[in-house]
Amino acid sequence: MGTFLVTVEDARVTFPCKEDEFVMGAMLHAGKGPVRYGCCGGGCGICKMRVVSGDYEVVKPMSRAHISEAQEADGLVLTCCVKPRGDLTLGRWP
Ligand code: FES
């Protein structure tokens, strides 16, 4: 089981995230980063961030009301829906 490092660019924090862990959960667990969350299920959009670099997998559906296909292609994610597949760098949204 791999563990990756997630860096939140503008908050200058880094925390570990296991490959089977949601990025938002790891951020909460570490008590780091701009932790904003609501539904934890991909529906409210409050946990939206931009993936600046790194590989990830969207494992829960992200509401199209909050992430359009174009935004998804541009690296915007709901952090409660994605798991890391390598080290990640995140930026805040907006
Ligand atoms: S916490 Fe609601 S979409 Fe992520």
Image (cartoon, grey):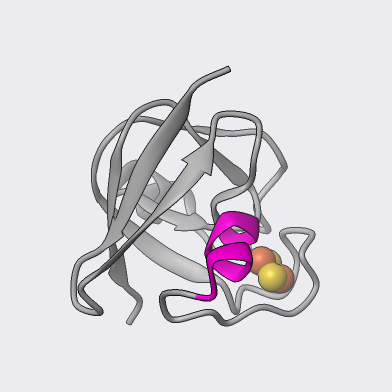
The reply, left or right, for residue 24 in relation to residue 73 is right
| Residue 66 shows in the view | no
Of residue 54 and residue 60, the one placed in the foreground of this image is 54
Secondary structure, magenta segment, majority class: helix
Q: How many marks overall?
A: 0
The reply, left or right, for residue 67 in relation to residue 49 is right
Q: Where ligand 1 lies, by quadrant?
A: bottom right
Where's the C terminus, which quadrant?
A: bottom left
x then y, percent, for residue 77? 47, 55
| Residue lying farthest to the top in this orientation | 1
In percent of the image, x 56 and y 72: which residue is there? 47
Where's the N terminus, which quadrant?
A: top right
x then y, percent, for residue 25? 65, 58
Q: Would you say residue 49 sits in the magenta stretch?
A: no
x then y, percent, for residue 79? 55, 58
In percent of the image, x 49 and y 69: which residue is there? 48
User: Is 25 placed above or below 91 here?
Assistant: above
User: Is 83 placed above or below 92 here?
Assistant: above
x then y, percent, for residue 87? 30, 36
In percent of the image, x 57 and y 82: which residue is there? 36
The reply, left or right, for residue 51 in relation to residue 68 is left
Which stretch did the figure color magenta?
Answer: 24-31
| Residue 30 shows in the view | yes
Tell me where residue 93 sits by quadrant: bottom left
